[in-house]
Amino acid sequence: MIPWLETDSPFPHPSTALTEKDGAAGLLAAGADLSASRLLYAYRNGIFPWFSEGQPILWWSTDPRMVLQVQDFKVSASLKKRLRQVSKDDRWQLRFDTAFEQVMRACAAPRKDREGTWISEGIVAGYCDLHKQGYAHSAEVWLDGELVGGAYGVCIGRMFYGESMFARVTDASKIALTHLVFFLREHDVKMIDCQQETGHLASLGAKPIARSEFLRRLEHATALPAISNWTITNKISL
């Protein structure tokens, strides 16, 4: 059994999350709300929301935790070629935070490889509040003035938590992620939380680490000063 949280309930410790033998590895609690304060507290403690439409709010803390050390980010030969093309073509622009809600809604749009979305209206509202407070950010790819790719997540101190990506043209989500990773490198962010292990994330250089190690690193990174300027528009330099 997992605890049901009221709006004023504290989270249980991540170590109490269900294990694989329980059938829902990493599930920690249910209920509460998606207020900005609740979300910030969750992220600071290695907890994230993930649930489908019609379900109560479910909170998770997976073990192991999939993370991308930014220095380990892999850029394939084909992506390098694509990035060089983008950097030389003025029709492309790479931005941060000029269309945060648009990026979220594009990530929530139906896709051929999945049914439904976990990015509900409540999720959109909660993360847009975080964006207004300076904690949630979008990396954006624009082509001829149209948003064609992007990624969004939460940044606390020098810790970034990746949430979702989308692409409307080939490689646009990979370009957005590369744009984000290079920016985070420049601002001394060492690690991106990827939450759950997938083959795609592994192909980009992400690896699982023990939750205890993740929480230890998290405590240090979130205590560092926040990045002060996300308004930069830049080109990726390989």
Image: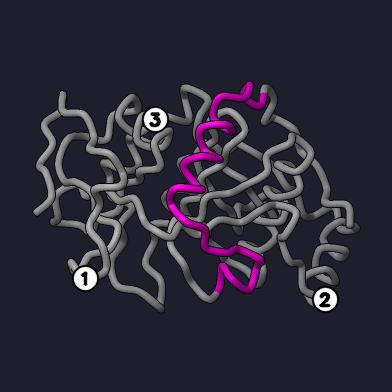
Label 3 sits on a secondary structure element that is helix
Element type at mark 2: helix
**Residue closest to the eye, 165 or 37:** 37
Cα distance in 3D space between marks 1 and 3: 29 Å
Q: Amino acid at mark 3?
A: Leu
Image position, residue 222 (x, y; %): 54, 30
Quick one: 223 or 52, which is closer to the camera? 223
Part of the protein shown in magenta: 200-227
Which is in the foreground here, disc 2 or disc 1?
Answer: 1
How many neighbours does mark 3 have within 10 angstroms: few (below 14), some (14-19), or many (20 or more)?
A: some
State the separation of the CA atoms marked 3 and 2: 37 Å
Find out whether residue 223 is within the magenta segment.
yes
Q: Residue at x 65, y 39 (%)?
A: 96
The circle drawn on residue 40 is 3
Q: Residues within 10 Å of mark 2 (few under 14, many from 20)?
A: few
215 in relation to 168, above or below: above
Report the residue marked by disc 2: 77
Residue type (three-letter) at the residue carrying disc 1 = Lys
Q: Residue at x 63, y 73 (%)?
A: 203
Give the residue number, with chain letter if any, for mark 1.
21
Q: Is residue 233 left or right of residue 1?
A: right
